[in-house]
Structures are given as C-alpha cells and as structure tokens.
Image (cartoon, coloured by chain):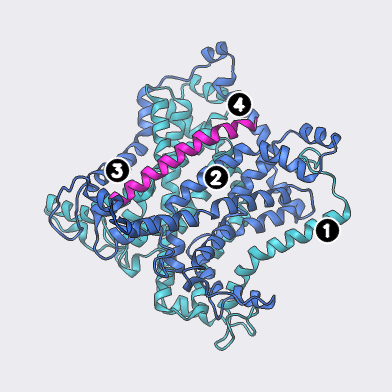
Amino acid sequence: MTSRLTKQQKPFPITTSRVLGDGQRKQHPAATPPSAIKRRRLPRWPLAGYLFLLPNGIGFVAFMLIPLLASLALAFTDWQMLSPDVRFVGLGNFIRLLGFTWTEEGIVWNDPDFWYFLYNTLFLMLGVPISMFVSLGLAILVNNRLPGIVVFRTLFYLPTICNGIAVLMLWRLMFHADVGLLNQMLGWVGIDGPDWLQSTAWAKPALIIVAVWIAAGGNNMIIYLAGLQNIPAELYEAANLDGAGWWSRLRHITWPQLAPSTFFIFTMGIIGAFQGGFNAAYIMTQGGPAGSTTTISYYIFNTAYDGQLLMGYGCAIAWVLFLLVMTITLVNWYVGRESALEGH
Amino acid sequence: MSSPAETGQANLGGTKAVALFLIMSLIAASTVLPLLWMVSTSLKQPGVPYSNFLPGTPTLRHYAEALGETPFIRYYVNSIVIASAITAGQLMTSAMAGYAFARLRFPGRNQIFFAYIATMMIPSAVTMVPLFILLTRAPIYLNDLLGTSYFTSEQFFLGRWFAGVPLGADSYFVLIAPLLFSPFGTFLLRQFFIAIPRSLDEAAMLDGCGPWQTFAHIILPLSKPALATLAIFTFMSAWGAFLWPLVMVNSDEMKPLPVGLAGFIGMYATNWPLLMSGATMMLIPMIVVFVFCQRFFVRGIQLGAVKG
C-alpha cells in the first residue's frame, strides 16, 4: 500500500519542491544573465496577448469592476432593496456604523452591534495561530520517515477535504449537549461538558475547535512540510556537533528557517478570518446565542439579504471590512517582512 | 521521501518510532472518529442513542428517505452540473490568461498581471451585494429592453426537466457565470507555464505556429498535471460553495447540495440520522476524489503557496 502510494507520487513527490524550484529559477529571467535575456525575449504578440486575456477581462469587468464601483456608490446611499427611493446620504452609513458620542457613562456607539461582531471576529481569529502551531507540529511529525507515513498524512488532511456544510452539520451534532459524541467522550474522563453551542461563553471556543480541526492537518501542514524539507541539512549537522538538543534545534534552526512559511500562513489566515465565520455560524449557531458567534461577514448577510435588505448599509460594512483587511495585510507585511527575510 | 538526516531528523530508534506511531495514530483518530461517527449515526435504527459510537444493527432507511422523500438527487445533479461547468470554464479562462502572462509580450503585461492578482485581496462581500442586485434585476430589465418575457420564463431541459430561468435568481447562469474567472487560477497556471522550457514553444513558433496553436498543441498538453490540480481545487471549492447560492436561489429545485442540505436542518431538526446520511452522501465523492488525486493536492498547494 505504502509503496504503491509512494510510487504514484513519484512525478511530484513533496521532496522535489526544491528541485522544481531550481528548475523554475533557471527559467526565470531574473536568474539568467542579461545577455541571455536579450537573446531569448518573448515573442511580441500584442493583439494575441489581449485576446487571450479577453475572457478574464470580460469576467473582471462584469463581475468585479462594475459591482465594485456599484458597491462604492451604494455605500453612500440608504437604499433598501424593495424601496424605490435611493437617497444619497454622504458619509451617513459610515457615521452610523463607526460613530459614537461621549456621554457621562462613557462612549456610546452608534452601532454597538458592529463592535460586538468585530470583537467576535477577532476572538475567532485565535484559531489562526492555534491552528498554525498545530500544523507545524503535524508537519514535524509527518516529516519523519516511518512506514505508513503517507497514510497518516492523508488522514490528517481528511477534514480539510470534507470542509463544508456537511462537516459543520456533523459538528453541530458533535457539540450537542445530550446526544453529542464530544460530551459523551468528556464524560468518560469525568468532565461534565458544557452545552457548547447554546452557551455565550462556549460557542466561540466551539467554533475555534472546529476551525482548527478542519484546517490544521490541511494546506498549512503541507506548506510547513515543504518548508521543513527545504531547510539545509548542514544546519542541523552543525547543531548536532554543538550538542544542541531537540528543543534547541527547533527553537534556533527550524522555527527561524520556517519564517517565510509562517509569515505566509499567518497572513493568509488573518485575511481569511476577517472575512470568514459565516458558514460555520450559519450552520451551527445561526450567529447566536445572543449574537455571540455573529461575525462581520454574517452581519453583512443579515443586513443586506435578510430582513430589511439594507443594501446601502450592507455595502458600507463591506467596505469597512475591506479597509480593515487591507490595513492588516499591509501592517502584517510591513512588520513581517523582516522576520520573513531572516529565514534566508 | 528524503532521508531523515537530510531533513534534520535524527535516525529513529525503535522505541521512538513506536512512540511517534502512537502519537500519530491518536491524532489520526481525532480526525477520523467524528467522520466515522457521522456514518454510524446515519445507519442507526430509531431508538439507538445518537451518542453511541456503533450503530447496532445498521439500517439504510435514512438514505432511502433522503433519496426518496426529499429532492436530494436533484440537489446532487445541480451540484454536479454547476461544479463541472465552473471547473471547465475556469480552466479555460485561467489557462488562456496564464499563457498570455507567461509567454506573450504586450504593453502593460506585468501591470495588468499584478493588478489582476491584487483583486484577490477584495473580500467577496464587497461585490456580492451589487452583484445580487444586478443579477436579480437583469432579466426584468432585459425583458423590458427587448420587449419579451423570455428572460423570466421557466426553462425545461429537453422539454422535461426544470432548468430554472435563463438569467437572474434561480438560474444556473448566476450560479456559474460569476465563478468562471479566477485570478488564483490564472496565477497558478502562469507559474506552471513559466517553468516549461521555452525552447519547446519557440520551436513550434519557428515552424509557423501562432500563439493559439502553440498554446493548444504545446503548452496545454505539457501542463496536464497543473490543469488537473487546478481542476480538482476548482471543483472542490465549487462543490462546497454556499453563500452565493444561498443568496441567489429561492426555488428548491435549483438548490445545489450545500444549500439543500442546510435547508434540511430547519426541516428535520431532530432527525439526525437523516441529516447525517445527507452529509455522508455529500462527502463521499470528495473523499474518493481526494484519495485518488492526492498528489495533485500536494502539488497545487506548493505551486500556489511556496512559489508565490
């Protein structure tokens, strides 16, 4: 079984990434001497170039550019889908969303829901580093040479494959206070599990558990695994000569060498988490109890598609989300750039 | 696999190997047990507690119920149609754009490329509201404009099977068309095309092939692994797509699987075996595809992330 799987993987086993990477670099203009570039310039086909881009171009204009501009315009109106009136309200939506007034009791937010849902979103983001560290641990485990390792890798990846409505339904039942498997198993070790999804205290941790279960053994583990296999063996040999222990090697070689992978995983995780949380909350908690699992993306859904169909306000929230994601990405990139470069 | 020394791992002694094996078995159990319990629950006779791990005497009645008394098969067909169309279309558009960015020279190429890639940063929530409005209204406007009622009339495939309306809410069009274009797919294939030795298509061009022939006869056949990778990723994500169809579909017959299944929760709230049989039937094709195409996953993740 193992040998067959390994053989099947031959064309693109994970360990060839370095080789493939080199091959690509040779092709890359930046790595070829300037004279070679001149000799081997790409054919100039302006018309063909644009024609090849045409399908994407049409799609981009129809389903990205026009909606993007429309969304920006709508964000400054108070339009409700079923009402014929579209009123320009200037920054009204944004003031309603982000504004506050000082009172004697302290700050009163114009839309306290938004800030609560933002807090929920940030809380659920704890799943990103947790899942990242689990991914690293799993990658280190499956980087060992053991019989059947491919089987383990496959099993770790399984939840990522199954990710979606079906698995979220399964976890809704898993967390069920009376008939769920989780509390049943906790009972075996003498723990009286909470009513996870009905409790404002436990619903968010429950969603984090699901997110980690789904993601930890998936793409991030594979990325870390590739990163591990690209660490030069000499570093470990030198460390072994110095008598470095397991933890010391992990702390001083593996972790810094993996900085680019960590940076990529963390950034993508944060970007995703800002926009995420809808599916899990919709299936498992409907955003409850008492709004404790409603994220920003869920709030946009509730505002724009459910109930009052507040299109203008929904667009305004979406733009604030966009700006948040952009800011965090830029800050993350700016801060992380150095840690990412240290790896080399 | 590379040798342990090469990857910085000490050679494993017997005890250590056994310990690792046990740890990994434990972790694997935590990923697999919930899924097995899902299957087990879907097979439980009435009266068997859901919290039991084993189903007792298994029964297929819940599968029969899901298939016979709900539009489950219809959801399934919808999902297959939608995900296949999205996969085929996205592969085509991404390959064409990827080829242009990798192999043709034209003014503004790099700027367009980076701008297109940057659009991946835009949250889908931003464009979804106006798309929802535009696409829900498009058929009405088109009817008015062309003086017809075609765009809101119900269609039947081969005069027999309900196929929604041509445009707008409850149409296959809205569930497919916006997803035919992908900056990610374009990026992935461009990365792959760049790595193909240039001499191959240069030779073809010297023989008089134009860009299209070079693309179709040289680049595409050489890119089967990358195309397969992208196809699998696209299919999986289209198969699981939830929010967009949830917003755009009202009629039960047009629902893809995830939306249909989510609707079960409201309808059969406490009939967990039925819900779990639906979930199991939804997951089986994904797991089968994964087991047979594992190498493409590993490859795709590396193309998308490590080299990005």
| Spatial CA span between label 2 and label 3 | 27 Å
Q: Quadrant of residue A82?
A: bottom left
Q: Which residues are magenta?
A: A316-344
Q: Which mark is residue A266?
A: 2
Spatial CA distance of label 1 from label 4 is: 40 Å
Q: Is residue A324 above or below residue A284?
A: above
Mark 4 residue type: Arg
Please give the name of the residue rendered at 81% of the width and 32% of the height, measured from the top-left corner. A238
**Label 2, residues with CA under 10 Å away: few <14, some 14-19, many ≥20:** some
**Chain ID for label 2?**
A
Instruction: Please identify the residue farthest to the bottom as the structure is shown.
Output: B47
Mark 3 or mark 4: name the one nearer the start of the chain: 4
Which of B206/B60 is in front?
B60
Could you tell me which quadrant the C terminus of chain A lies in? top right
Tell me the element at label 4. helix
Q: Label 1, on which residue?
A: B18
Q: Where does label 4 land, which residue?
A: A25
Where is mark 3, residue-wise? A68
Chain appearing in cyan on the rendered image = B
Residue A303 screen position, x and y as percent: 29, 59
- Image position of A16 (left or right of A58): right
